Image (cartoon, helix red, strand yellow):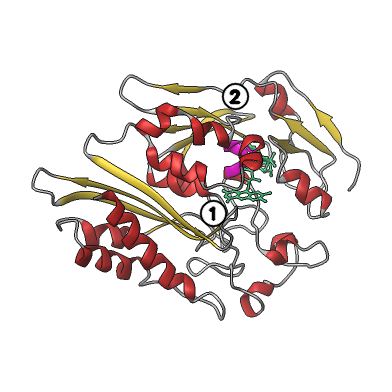
Amino acid sequence: MKDFDLKLPDTLEAAVGELPAEYSRDGAQVLAGGQDIVTVMKDDIEQPAALVSLQRLGLDGMQWDERGGLTIGATVTIQTLAEEASIERGLPALREAARSVGSPQIRSQGTLGGNLNQRPRCPYYRHPSVSCFKKGGSVCLAEFGFNKYAAIFGGGPSYYSHPSDLATVLVMLGATATIAGPGGERQVPLAELYVLPDQALDTETVLRPDEILTSVSIPAPAADARSSYLKYKERASYDFALAAVAVSVNRGDDGVVTDARVVLGGVAPKPWEVPAAAAALVGKAMAPEAWTAAGEAAVADADPLEHNGYKVHLVKGLLFRALEALV
Ligand SMILES: Cc1cc2nc3c(=O)[nH]c(=O)nc-3n(C[C@H](O)[C@H](O)[C@H](O)COP(=O)(O)OP(=O)(O)OC[C@H]3O[C@@H](n4cnc5c(N)ncnc54)[C@H](O)[C@@H]3O)c2cc1C
């Protein structure tokens, strides 16, 4: 691991001022909990000359508004989201997603902003001596090599799958990120935060190298909305999602679905919303026929590689179970 400077700015403006306008592997980068950035530095995947810590910026608060919306600071830990009683009452799917992340140690150190901005977990990207599109190379080894964990939607030219559990559920909840940069603040819906590999290969988000995600705001859910998050992982103790579903359903007095939202995790380079699956639920009673139809619609556009066709079946099963749990 190369030597680097640790910057500890006291203000957001000073922190932004430490960051470079253009991305380079050795330019300064943001440090939150450090679990991912330090790992990629140790493995020589990134070599920033400086890390700019968010520790002294006071981004660790949470605030409910009077209508039931929640704003969460970027350095709030994942463990706080997993334990906080008001989140369990008001946004149970967010709590489920937070509880599914890693282990208690990982959740206690990892932050919301770090979780949303963590780099891909593709074994080729993470291998210190392998070159690939994501590291400035000219090939995606997952396309024709070992691709059990790769994307079944939205891949090409790179086929990594998005690793963040929180991102999947926050897209489903209609959250918005606040981002600070040299020109001030801007708001970006979480659904628009991530880019696909055919749009950019050196990053996974629309954040510029000199921007910092400062908070995420979740609107108050509709009174009749019920939501859940369900994840399947290979290792029971702690692991990333092989596939996950975040689903929300509103029903009228007659029990018929009036609105729905379905977002998939672990199967695409970004949280993958499937409006067709939601449409298969609207106007129907919450019953197995509708859940099966939603599952078929969810995977209709899947394009699996050699070793990850199982994810198609996994998505259908997870969606069925997540919907069943809502009734
Ligand atoms: C063994 C293991 C298991 C894990 N399992 C899961 C899992 O099941 N599900 C899951 O979702 N995650 C999982 N993770 C990932 C873990 O949640 C992330 O590593 C962690 O959230 C990163 O948070 P951090 O605060 O340590 O970020 P850091 O390591 O400090 O930063 C991560 C990246 O985000 C950037 N960054 C951080 N904060 C900001 C910000 N506010 N604005 C802009 N950029 C920022 C950094 O520059 C860096 O590139 C696992 C990690 C490990 C090591």
> Crowding near pointer 1: few (<14 within 10 Å), some, many (20+)?
some
Which residue is more in the foreground, 195 or 232? 232
The answer to whether residue 233 is left or right of residue 210 is: left
Task: Describe the element under mark 1 as helix, strand or loop.
Answer: loop
Q: Nearer the viewer, residue 200 or 11?
A: 11
Does the magenta run of residues contain 116?
no
Q: Nearer the viewer, residue 54 or 137?
A: 54
Q: Residue at x 64, y 56 (%)?
A: 120
First along the sequence among labels 2 and 1: 2
Q: Is residue 110 above or below residue 290?
A: above
Q: Nearer the viewer, mark 2 or mark 1?
A: 2
Quarter of the image for residue 22 reads top right
Query: Which amino acid type is shown beneath numbered disc 1?
Result: Val
Q: x and y percent of residue 300 in the render?
A: 35, 72
Question: Can you identify the residue that label 2 sits on?
Answer: 59
Res. 61 image quadrant: top right
In the image, residue 246 lies at what x, y percent?
A: 39, 51
Q: Is residue 156 above or below residue 13?
A: below
Give the residue drawn at x 73%, y 28%.
17
Tell me the quadrant of ligand 1. top right
| Left or right: 50 as drawn, with respect to 138 | right
Name the residue located 47 percent from the left edge and 47 percent from the top edge. 192
Tell me where the magenta segment starts and ends, as one range. 110-115
Label 1 sits on residue: 195
> CB at mark 2 closer than 8 A to ligand 1?
yes
In three-dimensional space, the C-alpha distance between marks 2 and 1, rounded to whole angstroms, equals 25 Å
Element carrying mark 2: loop
The 10 Å Cα crowd at callout 2, few under 14, some 14 to 19, many 20 or more, is: some
* Residue 70 placement (x, y as % from top left): 41, 28
The amino acid beneath tag 2 is: Leu
